[in-house]
Image (cartoon, rainbow, N blue to C red):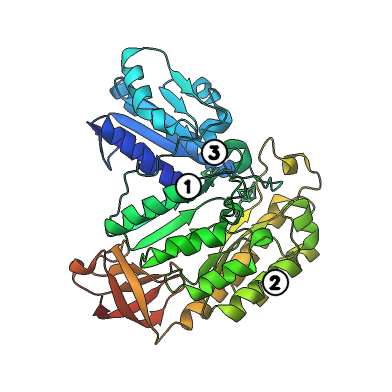
């Protein structure tokens, strides 16, 4: 029996899809890349921007034809849009068999068996809960793994739907995390990413002394080749964390630190709880303590009330900080969030104009930063053949920058040394010089 899973959204959703894959496998399904041959189709959805929802509706609509061809097929919609819209998805698309929420993942096998017995559509959405079993996930690559350490979010940034669809923060027990990291290490995982919407608030709800820096230190001591983490919130990024990254070689020199805006007025309306000055002090502590630390970010343009001078402040901050990469978004109102009620909307034309300016500035910086890598010899984890050119392999540097190089396929899954030959706009071309 075949199942098809399509994942939208962030790493947390990718991890949830790995859990879904695990439960499906227990029911006897194997994953397929083909929609047509799949008996079970699962969309694991994201709700962070309106565009994500619109696109999803397009994708679900296109499944109607498959369902008509074979009514025995089971179509499931899970994830953040399911949690958000609940049974309205089935009102809009009556052929959707199962809607399941972000706390219902471990039930998916039972829901599918039930659907085979009953005729009516199933909508199973819990409003809270916690059903993680860290060893219960089916990872697509044997050498790389996500490891969630905290779920949910308490920050309620005014634009963001995540706290509404993922609930309050719940930290996993440090012992469970360490046990899982040890298990992954024994299985040969070389690159592990500790995941959370705000990893820096790890442990606040546990009532023990452990915080994120001490957890990171414990995970790093297991000796996995690379330990990453994301996302960090600038308001909670501690000096101690800077020291843990500096002092532990296998904690990668890469920090994803969303700025969102360079204007204090906008940051306040966003409820981010820091000023640009604070953000710059964190960047300064990182850059002055950790050699060659790459910083990446997220930025939103067109937030309600944002004016030309606010946008200019964002551009200035981007010029000053010189992020290796930035994920840039046009503000999208999400129903139920505080910002959705705000007035002084920025016109679509201005939003697009600002977005274009920000993207071209950041692209120039990314290229210039990539140029600085030319001539350097760096370690890369080889992941796969390059999707762009299958005569080359694709590896990832410490900060996730892609490097392409010629080599026999046998090095896939290994750490190699690569000499960077040429910088491209978004990736590097290198030459293999050694295998670990
Ligand atoms: N927890 C992470 C990521 C949250 S979602 C964090 O705190 O940074 C990823 C990114 O999507 C956010 O950083 C933000 O830049 C963007 N985003 C979230 N809601 C948005 C909205 N309503 N409109 C546009 N971008 C949004
Ligand atoms: Fe959303 Fe803010 Fe929480 Fe990130 S920290 S998930 S942006 S509310
Ligand atoms: Fe992630 Fe999107 Fe949900 S960003 S937490 S999948 S709303």
Instruction: Identify the mark at residue 53; answer none if there is no mark.
Output: 3
Alpha carbon separation for disc pair 1 and 2? 28 Å
Callout 3: helix, strand or loop? helix
Q: Crowding near pointer 1: few (<14 within 10 Å), some, many (20+)?
A: some
Q: Sequence order check: which comes first, mark 3 or mark 1?
A: 1
Alpha carbon separation for disc pair 3 and 2? 34 Å
Residue at point 77%, 57% (across, down): 266
Q: Evaluate if marks 1 and 2 touch, with contact meaning CB atoms under 8 Å apart.
A: no
Q: Position of residue 381 (x, y in %)?
A: 33, 68
Q: Crowding near pointer 2: few (<14 within 10 Å), some, many (20+)?
A: some
Q: Position of residue 123 (x, y in %)?
A: 48, 21
- Toward the viewer: 102 or 3? 102
The verdict on label 1 being within 8 Å of ligand 3 is yes
Residue marked by disc 2: 280
Instruction: Identify the mark at residue 376; answer none if there is no mark.
Output: none
Can residue 324 be seen here? The reply is no
- Image-based side of 19 in relation to 58, left or right: left
Alpha carbon separation for disc pair 3 and 1? 17 Å
Residue at point 70%, 39% (across, down): 337
Q: Evaluate if marks 3 and 2 touch, with contact meaning CB atoms under 8 Å apart.
A: no
Can residue 434 be seen here? The reply is yes
Q: Crowding near pointer 3: few (<14 within 10 Å), some, many (20+)?
A: some
Callout 1: helix, strand or loop? helix
Q: Quadrant of residue 154?
A: top right
- Image-based side of 52 in relation to 187, left or right: right
Q: Is residue 80 above or below residue 90?
A: below
Residue marked by disc 1: 12
The verdict on label 3 being within 8 Å of ligand 3 is no
Callout 2: helix, strand or loop? helix
Q: Position of residue 87 (x, y in %)?
A: 53, 22
């Amino acid at each position: 029996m075949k199942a098809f899973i399509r994942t939208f959204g962030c790493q947390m959703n990718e991890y949830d899809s790995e859990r879904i894959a695990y439960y499906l496998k227990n029911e006897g399904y194997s994953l397929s890349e083909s929609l047509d041959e799949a008996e079970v189709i699962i969309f694991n959805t994201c709700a962070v921007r309106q565009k994500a929802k619109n696109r999803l509706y397009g994708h679900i609509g296109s499944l109607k034809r498959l369902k008509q061809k074979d009514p025995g097929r089971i179509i499931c919609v899970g994830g953040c849009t399911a949690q958000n819209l609940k049974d309205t998805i089935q009102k809009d698309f009556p052929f959707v068999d199962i809607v399941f929420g972000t706390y219902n993942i471990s039930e998916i096998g039972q829901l599918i068996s039930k659907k085979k017995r009953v005729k009516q559509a199933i909508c199973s959405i819990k409003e809270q809960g916690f059903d993680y079993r860290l060893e219960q996930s089916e990872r697509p690559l044997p050498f790389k793994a996500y490891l969630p350490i905290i779920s949910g979010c308490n920050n309620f940034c005014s634009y963001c739907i995540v706290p509404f669809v993922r609930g309050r923060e719940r930290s996993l027990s440090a012992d469970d995390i360490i046990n899982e990291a040890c298990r992954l290490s024994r299985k040969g995982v070389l690159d592990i990413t500790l995941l959370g919407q705000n990893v820096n608030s790890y442990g606040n709800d546990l009532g023990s002394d452990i915080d994120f820096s001490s957890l990171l230190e414990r995970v790093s001591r297991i000796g996995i080749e690379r330990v990453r983490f994301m996302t960090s919130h600038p308001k909670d990024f501690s000096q101690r964390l800077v020291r843990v990254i500096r002092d532990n070689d296998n904690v990668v020199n890469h920090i994803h630190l969303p700025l969102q805006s360079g204007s204090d007025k906008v940051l306040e309306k966003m409820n981010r709880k820091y000023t640009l000055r604070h953000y710059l002090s964190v960047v300064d502590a990182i850059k002055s303590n950790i050699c060659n630390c790459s910083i990446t970010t997220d930025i939103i343009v067109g937030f309600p009330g944002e004016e030309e001078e606010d946008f200019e402040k964002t551009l200035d901050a981007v010029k000053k900080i010189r992020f290796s990469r930035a994920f840039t978004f046009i503000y999208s109102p999400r129903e139920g969030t505080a910002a959705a009620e705000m007035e002084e909307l920025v016109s679509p034309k201005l939003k697009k104009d600002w977005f274009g300016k920000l993207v071209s500035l950041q692209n120039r910086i990314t290229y210039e930063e990539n140029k600085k890598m030319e001539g350097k010899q760096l370690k890369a984890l080889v992941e796969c053949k390059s999707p762009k050119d299958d005569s080359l392999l694709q590896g990832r540097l410490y900060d996730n920058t892609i490097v392409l190089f010629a080599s026999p396929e046998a090095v896939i899954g290994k750490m190699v040394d690569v000499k960077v030959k040429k910088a491209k706009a978004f990736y590097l071309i290198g030459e293999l010089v050694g295998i670990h």
